[in-house]
């Protein structure tokens, strides 16, 4: 019975949160930032989770795993649908290269940092060490647009070029992050060291075959124009089916659905209608994800606060150095401020989804610790990023 | 020519989809499923598989004029534990959560579909139909089971007294209808009119009435088997009290929904989903809680609460049309899930075990319904076409009948197994035949597409 009430509770939270969060109430700056991004739902999840009220105990969370997978699938579809090649082509190729370079630089730096530091505070096998480092690096590469979107129109007008570049980079960053994240699912901790290359190849083959099959299925379903209600049913059915299939083959529902979303937005005639359906429940889905992620956090030790600070620092350096490199790339990019990375600190929803996906797949104490520190790192960024963005734009002015 | 090409193309695409879905299902079944994450994946994959396959089969079924819900049911049967075994019995049980949610949602729709004005207008016809159907169907089935009990293998070993009890219980269960199927067919055909109003009024009222009738049947059966009991009036007073309380809660909930619509309005489908799920689960929990902690046997009827809520929003507020529109938007996924899971739950083993008896039972029930609706139509001076076709609208049976059979099984374990087997078999027949006949009836009376 507990699982039903937990389900009721989180539906209620998502529903009420949907109407209360993401609104610009007149609150003090610190609280407003917190409130606007729905971060409070992370803490709500933590409160409901095993660490405090234990309403979402491990057994209940396990019972709600199908829902968690569906949420990841839905978010994957949504992100995939945002990468429309035709729209991305409107910007110069230099922008694309800049975005990829900046995110890959962050990935490499954070990966090296996490990989090197991990043995000092957690015991892991080699494969888990690699895949965990990849996940944290992928999450670090993500950039959210929330801060940029919330800029005052006057500020946007005065810094139009930089804001455009920042927006572009933050929308492309996710692509690199997800491509890197694939490695975390191909290199599985259960693989034996001696045979790992064969096992990685086999895992890659299975996931490619499954993704291709699901993609064909999806395109077949959408090869004809459907009514609104039929389309809604098909999207729901496909999201449930693909996320389920991904879990069975030990793959990521986020990645499979991202790929499907990407193909749908680029090859389907119904892309607008599909996107509207997906986006209609975006906020409750995102808030539920935060509640789930929060429930899985383990903030038992004070050490984690410092570890999170270390993770944040690596990411900060990666973004900053990546930003500097970007401005040296070409004549069009040289006109932007060197500290471009200061505007790319906010991590947002995709990073959370990546972390949650990994946490669900490899639930163990070490992973939980790593995810917790990464989430704390995201929260640090939530507080620091608006200030840094403001500084960057003030300098440019 | 172009139209023909389109049809062939569409069939080919759907065929390819079915092949691909089946291949995926077969592939997934060959993999080892160990972790909880993979088990969760299996639940999701099965659910998605059922949704998609039900959608494709139902769309193809419409080419041969089958109602959509028949497609969902067939898909459920094919995917279910008794045919392909892709959905195991355990998995169907795990998906009950969705079933309860869907049923409450359909009950909201059923209540909302009842309009006080049309009920008043059709009261003679509705009342005569209810009275005659209850009496004639009950006696037809009772007499059939009583007289022929010795000739069927499933009942031949039962002593005479138990055959009588068996007949009383089956006679009562035969009265039960499936409002969910009726609502789904009416919604699909966008049907409206006098015939639809009567059918809805009769079906939903019988759904409420059957709870009282079955309590009477259980009490009489107990007296008959023990031969020393008396009819306890307090049982009925409590039952009526519980029903009244459920209706009252429904009315309060209805008021809440109409307030939500007038004040907030947006995201009503999500809110209604929350209400439907909340009502279903809270009712069950409250029943258990009151019994365990206070020794009070309070049995709330979630379906009655939801029906009453829907009825109050429709008839005692200005928000009825918007409420129904919102329900309509959510109807397709709900119907697909509910009926395909219902199809997966249909017990083919029972049907194979007692098909001669089940077939005769279903035929007698059909004959009883025909006589009662024809007589009721004559008494209330309905159109000749309505009199002749009304029986076709009352064949469907589903969850309520199964619930009643399971209740009887707990009360009379010695005959309960036979009862459940027969009821499951008859429901399988009625749930396959019923929707097809109802859709045909709506076409014959010409009320399709009138909404």
Image (cartoon, coloured by chain):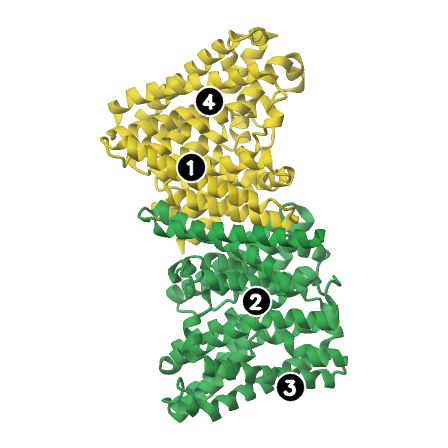
Q: Are marks 2 and 3 on the same chain?
A: yes
Query: What is the quadrant of residue A108 in the picture?
Result: top left
Using residue B8 as the reference point, say whether residue A284 is left or right of it: left
Q: Which mark is residue B371?
A: 3
Residue B159 image offset from top left, x and y in percent: 37, 91
| Chain at tag 4 | A
| Distance between the alpha carbons at the discs numbered 2 and 1 | 50 Å
Sequence-wise first label, 2 or 3: 2
Front disc: 3 or 4: 3
Looking at the image, which residue is at 60% across and 62% down?
A: B61
Q: Is residue B113 above or below residue B419?
A: above
Looking at the image, which residue is at 49% across and 38% down?
A: A257
Which of the pair B429/A298 is nearer the observer?
B429
Q: Is residue B386 above or below residue A84?
A: below
Label 3: element kind: helix
Q: Which chain is yellow?
A: A
Label 1: element kind: helix
Sequence-wise first label, 4 or 1: 1
Q: Are marks 3 and 4 on the same chain?
A: no
Label 2: element kind: helix
The crowding category of the residue bearing disc 4, from other C-alpha atoms within 10 Å (few below 14, some 14 to 19, many at least 20), is: many
Q: Which chain is green?
A: B
Which residue is under mark 4?
A381
Which of the pair A3/B347 is nearer the observer?
B347
Which residue is under mark 2?
B304
Asked whether residue B335 appears in the rendered view, the answer is: yes
Which residue is under mark 1?
A208
Q: Are marks 2 and 4 on the same chain?
A: no
Using residue B295 as the reference point, say whether residue B391 is left or right of it: right
Asked whether residue A296 appears in the rendered view, the answer is: no
């Amino acid at each position: 019975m507990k699982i039903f009430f937990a389900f009721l509770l989180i539906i209620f939270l998502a529903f009420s949160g949907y109407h209360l969060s993401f609104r610009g109430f007149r609150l003090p700056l610190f609280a407003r930032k917190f409130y606007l991004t729905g971060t409070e739902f992370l803490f709500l999840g933590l409160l409901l989770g095993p660490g405090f009220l234990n309403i979402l105990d491990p057994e209940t969370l396990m019972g709600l795993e199908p829902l968690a997978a569906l949420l990841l699938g839905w978010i994957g579809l949504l992100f995939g649908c945002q990468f429309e090649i035709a729209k991305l082509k409107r910007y110069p190729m230099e922008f694309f290269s800049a975005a990829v370079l900046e995110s890959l630089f962050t990935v490499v730096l954070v990966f090296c940092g996490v990989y090197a530091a991990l043995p000092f505070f957690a015991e892991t096998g080699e494969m888990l060490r690699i895949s965990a480092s990849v996940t944290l690096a992928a999450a670090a590469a993500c950039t959210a647009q929330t801060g940029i979107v919330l800029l005052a129109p006057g500020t946007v007008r005065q810094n139009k070029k930089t804001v455009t570049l920042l927006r572009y980079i933050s929308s492309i960053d996710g692509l690199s992050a997800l491509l890197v994240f694939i490695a975390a699912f191909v290199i599985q901790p259960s693989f034996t060291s001696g045979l790992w290359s064969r096992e990685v190849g086999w895992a890659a083959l299975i996931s490619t075959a499954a993704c291709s099959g699901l993609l064909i299925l999806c395109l077949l379903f959408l090869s004809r124009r459907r009514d609104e209600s039929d389309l809604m049913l098909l999207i729901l059915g496909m999201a449930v089916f693909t996320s389920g299939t991904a879990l069975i083959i030990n793959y990521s529902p986020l990645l499979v659905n991202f790929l499907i979303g990407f193909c749908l937005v680029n090859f389907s005639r119904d892309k607008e209608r599909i996107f509207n359906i997906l986006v209609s429940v975006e906020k409750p889905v995102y808030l539920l994800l935060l509640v789930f992620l929060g429930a899985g956090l383990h903030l038992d030790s004070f050490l984690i606060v410092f570890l999170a600070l270390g993770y944040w620092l690596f990411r900060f350096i990666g973004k900053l150095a990546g930003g500097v490199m970007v401005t040296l790339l070409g004549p069009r990019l040289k006109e932007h401020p060197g500290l471009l990375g200061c505007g790319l600190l906010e991590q947002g929803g995709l990073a959370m989804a990546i972390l949650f996906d990994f946490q669900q797949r490899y639930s163990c104490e070490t992973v939980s610790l790593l995810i917790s520190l990464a989430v704390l790192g995201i929260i640090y960024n939530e507080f620091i990023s608006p200030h840094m963005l403001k500084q960057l734009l003030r300098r440019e002015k | 020519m172009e139209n023909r090409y389109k049809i062939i193309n569409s069939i080919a695409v759907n065929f390819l989809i079915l092949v691909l879905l089946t291949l995926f299902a077969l592939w997934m079944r060959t993999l080892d499923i160990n972790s909880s994450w993979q088990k969760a994946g299996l639940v999701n994959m099965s659910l998605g598989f059922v949704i998609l396959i039900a959608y494709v089969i139902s769309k193809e079924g419409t080419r041969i004029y089958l109602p959509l819900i028949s497609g969902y049911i067939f898909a459920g049967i094919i995917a279910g534990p008794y045919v392909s075994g892709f959905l195991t019995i355990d998995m169907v049980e795990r998906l009950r959560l969705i079933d309860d949610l869907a049923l409450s949602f359909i009950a909201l729709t059923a209540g909302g579909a009842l309009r006080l004005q049309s009920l008043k207008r059709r009261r003679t016809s509705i009342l005569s139909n209810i009275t005659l159907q209850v009496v004639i169907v009950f006696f037809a089935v009772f007499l059939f089971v009583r007289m022929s009990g010795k000739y069927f293998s499933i009942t031949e070993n039962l002593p005479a007294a138990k055959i009588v009890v068996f007949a009383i219980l089956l006679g009562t269960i035969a009265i039960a209808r499936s409002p969910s199927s009726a609502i789904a067919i009416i919604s699909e055909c966008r049907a409206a009119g006098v015939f639809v109003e009567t059918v809805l009024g009769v079906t939903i009222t019988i759904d409420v009435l059957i709870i009282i009738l079955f309590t009477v049947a259980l009490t009489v059966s107990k007296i008959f088997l023990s031969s020393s009991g008396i009819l306890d009036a307090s049982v009925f007073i409590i039952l009526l009290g519980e029903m009244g309380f459920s209706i009252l809660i429904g009315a309060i909930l209805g008021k809440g929904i109409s307030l939500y619509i007038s004040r907030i309005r947006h995201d009503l489908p999500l809110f209604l989903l929350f209400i439907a799920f909340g009502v279903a689960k809270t009712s069950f929990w409250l029943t258990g809680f009151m019994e365990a902690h206070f020794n009070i046997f309070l049995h709330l009827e979630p379906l009655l609460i939801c029906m009453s809520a829907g009825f109050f929003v429709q008839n005692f507020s200005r928000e009825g049309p918007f409420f129904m529109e919102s329900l309509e938007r959510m109807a397709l996924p709900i119907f697909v899930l509910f009926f395909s899971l219902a199809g997966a739950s249909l017990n083919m083993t029972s049907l194979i075990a007692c098909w001669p008896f089940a077939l005769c039972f279903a035929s007698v029930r059909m004959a009883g319904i025909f006589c009662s609706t024809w007589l009721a139509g004559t008494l209330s001076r309905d159109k000749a076409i309505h009199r002749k076709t009304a029986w076709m609208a009352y064949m469907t049976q589903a969850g309520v009948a199964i619930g009643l059979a399971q209740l009887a099984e707990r009360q009379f374990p010695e005959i309960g197994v036979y009862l459940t087997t027969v009821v499951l078999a008859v429901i399988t027949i009625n749930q396959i035949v019923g929707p097809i006949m109802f859709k045909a009836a709506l076409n014959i009376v010409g009320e399709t597409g009138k909404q």
